Amino acid sequence: MPSPRPPVVGLLLAAGRASRFRAATGRDKLTETIPLGQPYAGIPVIAAAASALRAAVDEVIVVVDSDNARAIGLAEALGCTAVRCKSGGIGESIALGVAARPDASGWVVAPADMPFVKTATIKAIIKAMSADAIVAPVHAGQRGHPVGFGKRFGPALMKLSGDEGARSIIAAIQPVLIETDDQGTLRDIDHPDDWKAKG
């Protein structure tokens, strides 16, 4: 009997300080409820992003600010594993997430402040993934998120630090680009005015 394949793991990056949104509202954008008139209205931002990812991958790891108890609670209530991060740096967040599941067959790295990405888009990224591939969606000529990394890139991802994220890894290889009509791949919530954009 063949052994089961290693899982595809979703990494939801939720450790950032969200300073622009917090300065404008005094609130945390990841636990903010999506307003009426938007997709997933009434659901916290982090919950919408985690749910879309959870429906596509085998397991979701949320790398979250260790002081953000509400975000941790929301992630765990959805069946995600919370990994605490103190620095908030994107590079360190990715490294911690991959290190929590280094045996995965691949990782889909998704920012938690992009709640409008469709599950179908994530599934298309996974379908195009292989051990040696990096896969990213493209909408309206722009490369977006999330980004899938095959198993080969695990060691490099675990060495990341700071705020640059995985740009250096992506720049060293020609990623596989998936054309999509999913506007959510480009739409993040950095400021309250971002809710006014089309959903």
Image (spheres, helix red, strand yellow):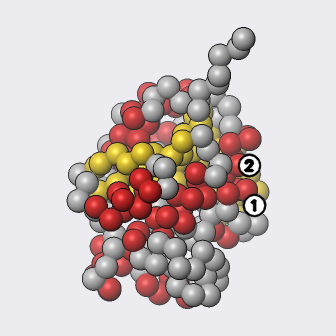
Residue 74 placed where, x, y %? 41, 61
4, 147: nearer the viewer: 4
Asked whether residue 134 is in view, the answer is yes
199, 49: nearer the viewer: 49
Residue 104 placed where, x, y %? 53, 30
- Mark 1 crowdedness (10 Å alpha carbons): few <14, some 14-19, many ≥20: some
In the image, is residue 190 above or below residue 16?
below
Residue type at numbered disc 1: Thr
Q: Indicate left or right for 35 with 177 as reference.
A: left
39, 180: nearer the viewer: 39
Q: Residue at left 70%, top 14%?
A: 2
Which quadrant of the rendered structure holds the C terminus?
bottom right
Q: Residue at left 55%, top 26%?
A: 152
Q: Looking at the image, which residue sits at the far top?
A: 1
The numbered disc on residue 124 is 2
Q: Quadrant of residue 21?
A: bottom left
Give me the C-alpha separation between circle 1 and circle 2.
9 Å
Residue 71 placed where, x, y %? 36, 62
Residue 142 placed where, x, y %? 65, 63
Q: Indicate left or right for 121 with 60 as reference.
A: right
The numbered disc on residue 62 is none
- Dots 1 and 2: beta carbons under 8 Å? yes
Q: Residue at left 52%, top 85%?
A: 35
Q: Indicate left or right for 62 with 173 as reference.
A: left
- Residue where numbered disc 1 is placed: 180
Residue type at numbered disc 2: Ala
**In front: label 1 or label 2:** 2
Earlier-in-chain disc, 1 versus 2? 2
